[in-house]
Image (cartoon, rainbow, N blue to C red):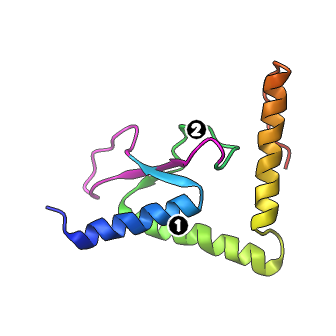
């Protein structure tokens, strides 16, 4: 049986994931392992993380591994901001550029071209 602290931990993880553009979900290809319950992360919605397919599992692992992985993502974003390499505004602008290119390609009935970095 799951205790309330575990429920709160999962809710906090879901909120952190959502803030980064992910949604917590069931693993598509269930792995039987001794590590415990496995979870996966996918892009949250059609506007989040536009360079990834909507069904792409960007992370698969246990809740504990997820906490470490999320901390790494958060750290890298903070580090980029300290170096002034990137920030939230630049990231959002680039993501909108990808969305606009895809929409334009759809309107022109063309195949979507890969993203230029």
Residue 18: give x, y in percent of width and height. Answer: 53, 59
Decide if residue 26 is on the left or right side of residue 103: left
**Whole-percent x and y of residue 10?**
35, 64
Q: Outermost residue, bottom direction? A: 82
List the single residue furthest toward the left: 1
> Residue 109, image x and y in percent?
81, 18
Labelled disc at residue 54: 2
Q: Which residue is mark 1?
A: 70
Give the residues in magenta: 26-47
Find out whether the residues at labels 2 and 1 contact each other: C-beta distance under 8 Å: no
Which of the two discs, 2 and 1, labels the residue nearer the N terminus? 2
Residue 50 placed where, x, y %? 69, 44
Q: Is residue 46 left or right of residue 101?
A: left
Q: Main secondary structure of the magenta part?
A: loop
| Residue at 34% in and 52% down | 38
Of 112 and 44, nearer the camera is 44
Residue under the point 54% across and 54% down: 22
Q: Is residue 17 visible?
A: yes
Separation of marks 2 and 1 at Cα, in angstroms: 19 Å
Mark 1 element type = helix
Does residue 35 belong to the magenta stretch?
yes
Rendered residue at 40%/55% (across/down): 61
């Amino acid at each position: 049986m799951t205790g309330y602290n575990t429920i709160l931990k999962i809710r906090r993880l879901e909120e952190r994931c959502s803030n980064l553009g992910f949604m917590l979900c069931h693993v598509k290809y269930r792995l039987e392992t001794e590590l415990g319950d496995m979870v996966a992360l996918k892009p949250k919605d059609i506007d989040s993380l536009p360079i990834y397919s909507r069904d792409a599992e960007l992370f698969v692992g246990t809740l504990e591994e997820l906490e470490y992985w999320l901390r790494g993502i958060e750290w890298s974003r903070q580090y980029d901001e300290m170096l002034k390499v990137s920030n939230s505004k630049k990231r959002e602008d680039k993501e909108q550029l990808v969305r606009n290119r895809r929409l334009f390609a759809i309107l022109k009935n063309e195949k979507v071209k890969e993203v230029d970095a």
